Amino acid sequence: MVAQAGRDLDVHENVVRKWVKEFGSDPVQAFPGHRQMKPEQQEIERLRREVAKLKAERDILKNCPALWRAARGRNSLVLSFWLGG
């Protein structure tokens, strides 16, 4: 039966056996995809989004000449507050 399923799916029968084993041990997470990610993958995606957001914020601050002019003037306290310092 497993061998026939492998032929029908055009995969080796050991792959089908692995799928059956994974499904038996954790049916919910056995076949991630279709918006079903393992918790580790969800955390990686969350961190990637956070990194992208932080990079965008950094780039905004790097490319804002008004902030740097303020830092050289009397308003450096404001800049420090904006930058979290």
Image: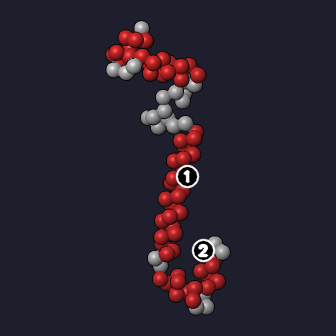
Q: Give the residue drawn at x 63%, y 72%.
A: 84
Estimate the x, y position of residue 8 in percent, counting from the top left: 33, 16
Label 2, residues with CA under 10 Å away: few <14, some 14-19, many ≥20: few
Up the image or down, 40 lies above or below 61; here it is above
Estimate the x, y position of residue 39 in percent, counting from the top left: 58, 39
- Tag count in the figure? 2
Up the image or down, 64 lies above or below 21; here it is below
Label 1, residues with CA under 10 Å away: few <14, some 14-19, many ≥20: few
Type of amino acid at the residue the image marks with label 1? Leu
The residue wearing badge 2 is 83
Give yes or no for contact between labels 2 and 1 (Cβ–Cβ under 8 Å).
no
Q: Give the residue drawn at x 54%, y 27%.
A: 28
Q: Which mark is residue 74?
A: none
Task: Give the residue furthest to the bottom.
Answer: 73
Where's the N terminus, which quadrant? top left
Up the image or down, 61 lies above or below 35; here it is below
Q: Nearer the viewer, residue 81 or 31?
A: 31
Estimate the x, y position of residue 55 in percent, counting from the top left: 50, 64
Label 2 vs label 1: CA separation?
21 Å
Estimate the x, y position of residue 35 in percent, counting from the top left: 47, 37
Q: Give the residue drawn at x 43%, y 12%.
A: 2
Which of the two labelled residues, at mark 2 and mark 1, occupies the earlier sequence position?
Answer: 1
Is label 2 in a helix, a strand or a loop?
loop
* Apparent side of residue 63 relative to residue 47 in the rendered image (left or right): left
Up the image or down, 24 lies above or below 71; here it is above
Is label 1 in a helix, a strand or a loop?
helix
Q: Give the residue drawn at x 58%, y 91%.
A: 73
Q: Which mark is residue 47?
A: 1
Where's the C terminus, which quadrant? bottom right
Quarter where residue 6 is shown = top left
Quarter where residue 83 is shown = bottom right
Type of amino acid at the residue the image marks with label 2? Leu
